[in-house]
Amino acid sequence: MKEHLAEVIELVQRSHVALAEGKHPEARVIAMKAATKAGKVLNAFTDPAELRLAKPVAAFTLQWTDLLRKDADKALALSDKLLWLSCEIHGANWFPVFKFEKGSSMDYQPVNYEDIPIQLPDTGLEQVPEFRLVDSDPGLEGFDDLCQDLLPNCSFVSSLLSIYDLNLGDKLEKLVRYDDEEEAVKVKLHINGCEREINISADLPFLDYPHNERHLFVLSTTNVALMWPAYLEKAYLIASGDHYNFSGSNMAQDTYMLLGWAPEVRKISKMSMESFAELWDLRKKGLLALGLGTGQMSDSLASQLKVVSGHDYVVSGYSEKGLTLKNPWSSGQEGRFLNVDASVFGQFSYVYLNWNMDALYKHSFSTAVISPPPKSKALLLDRPQFVLENSSNETQTVGITVEHFVLKNEPVSPYSVSVYENTRGKVVYPSQYVRAAGGKMTTMRVYFLKFEIAANSKNTLVIAGPQGRVIFSLKLWSHSPDVKMYRAKPTYDNVTEIEDAWTKDNNGGNWALESYIDNPQWELEIKRRMPKLFIAVSCKEESDVNFHLLHTEKSQNLTKLRNFDKSKILFCDNYSPGIHHHELHDVEPGNLRLVVSNYNSDYIGKFHLLLMYDGSKGDLIIEKVPKALGLYNDTVEFSWNLRNRYKFTVRTEVTNTSVIFKLQAGTKLQTLSSYRPAVRASLFDAVTQQPVVVNDKWNDSVYGVFVDCVLKKPNHDYILLVERFETGEGICRVTSGSSSRLSVKGEDEK
């Protein structure tokens, strides 16, 4: 009946996945099937040994079913749902291990296994390996003589040997559940935030004569019947995605998968042989696993040093004279061990460390989080952030692992982990606070940080970098229960984020250009005095960005800016690469115009606008200002030809048509330093000659000269008179924006 227990466990796993996917009815139905089957198994078992196996599974299943029945929404925490949503890794299902009241789901032999097409490498032996079912002796006899052969997975084999040297071989064997009567094997590894199990076939790839002495799997030279390490290796290779066509890893990452010990990689250039004394002492106490990696080196240097390029070794001994390394590749004792003194030590590239954090620290906390695609390259507000609070009166040393989940067939996205000290909630931009630890980009699946948190202070951890959706898990270790980790919140009560873009039509460039007033603009109506208002704009590229705030009258609400009046500006900052931000204090009620600009008017791309403030959400009303002058827009131009007056005939078919005319000089983009004649414009009734709008002031503004009017009569001619202070040459552009269609004809037109 053991196959029925395996089926019950599989049903409960499927129920967890369904719940995590939001399929509550399906999760309940599957759970009820599991509970019914578990009940039948209990009734069928009479042997006490069988009952001892069945009762924990049945109790767990009934408890899960009851949770779903009472409140499915609370049956799994959000972080647990993320673990169950991350079961598919490179096409194979890795389910979180169930912890029962007594034992775990790893105690139950699988009957079925996933049919996974296994990739095989080109061995260069003109022979395709054949998979065959094999039996395995239990125990650890010959484990110390495990070695790799054709497969370039020195990191994994070194991890096995290193863990065995720590007297933890029995712990490795418990990672594999195998039975010679079954074709299925269950393997447990630490991946995607927790211990996970997979059911695989018990067959392994063999080569036939004349290459039958060569192997694609880890094998003991003194006990060829010790096959369960090869099952463990097979599951590891499936998790890597490359299978037996393995492309490489490192010892620190592989030991993490086997033990869950925090991985750290240090550069040899930053260490000395003397520093190993303390490390070796921790290693002897079972608190640390150690290895070395050569990195890439020339064949001549590798031969001279008697090492292998790009190879990992187990640190199996230490003295004042040097290190003793164990080679996972050598099959005989002669040449398997290598003595390394200070001169050779410096030729290695990496030291691999795995810390037994659960033994080194008293307290731990873990969680998982989704990192969505970033809205901004420079702003951090939407990145996963956690407060690390030390409420004790002493400085506390903590350690944190951050694990990048592998989802389906996606590779690890480059990411960084930064810790900022003495923070107040979420970090908005990288230079806002002092970075206390981290900050470098990495592609390691698991990243480890160790640092100090000052007494009675808060730090903030920020994960940044991934461009797509990624799930991360975090685990914090500390000596004190007064060290807490929780999700960071914005410093301000209200956060408004706006996604927009500069296009060829609305990128007006910097304020020295005539087109500055064409930049994206927002009307800010402040209802109540604001103690603080934070504004930031950013774009993905390293382009120079800025924004300006100007006082405006309520009558100009949602009307496009017509001038850059420095007397009305609240502040004037220089343009900044990638991101610009400013915090205002004690902002009085009123209307402000926010203009977002890029120094380069040719830039085309998205930008991200962020506004944060304290108080009620209704204290600030934000509205986008229309970019066009009117509903209907058109531009005509004429040549002065030594004239100082020019007339247009304007006509509309709709009563009370609102019109805005804008006059600009030349055909090219004007700048503050460009010469422009002073102009003015007035509007007259063509029939009565009566003035509609008269302007008597001359204006040479780089942003243009504006005329506002209303054409009250339909199908009636009006005259727009454009005047120049002195006669001359050049082009004048006349842009009209109106509430209905206009006909604008110049005096030169027939």
Image: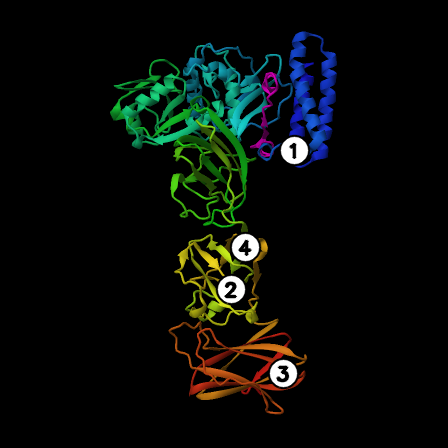
Element marked by disc 4: strand
Residue 49 in the image, given as x and y percentages of width and height: 65, 8
Foreground residue, 680 or 728? 680
Extreme bottom residue here?
Answer: 688
**Residue identifier under label 4:** 499
Badge 3 or badge 1: first in the primary sequence: 1
Q: What whole-number distance in Å separates the C-alpha atoms at marks 1 and 2?
A: 46 Å
Q: Quadrant of residue 14?
A: top right
- Disc 1 residue crowd, few under 14, some 14–19, many 20+, Cα 10 Å: few
Residue 641 in the image, given as x and y percentages of width and height: 45, 87
- Residue 242 seen in the current view: no
Residue 523 in the image, given as x and y percentages of width and height: 54, 63
Element marked by disc 2: strand
The reply to whether callout 3 and callout 2 are in contact (CB within 8 Å) is no
**Residue identifier under label 2:** 592
Front tag of 3 and 4: 4
Badge 1 or badge 4: first in the primary sequence: 1
Badge 3 or badge 2: first in the primary sequence: 2
Kindly identify the amino acid type of the residue bearing the numbered disc 1. Lys
- Disc 3 residue crowd, few under 14, some 14–19, many 20+, Cα 10 Å: many
Name the residue: 40% across, 22% down.
289
Quick check: 607 above or below 300? below
**Residue identifier under label 3:** 651
The reply to whether callout 3 and callout 1 are in contact (CB within 8 Å) is no
Kindly identify the amino acid type of the residue bearing the numbered disc 3. Arg
| The C terminus lies in quadrant | bottom right
**Residue identifier under label 1:** 74
Front tag of 1 and 4: 1
**Highlighted range, magenta:** 81-107
The reply to whether callout 3 and callout 4 are in contact (CB within 8 Å) is no
Examine the structure image and report whether residue 85 is included in the region drawn in magenta.
yes
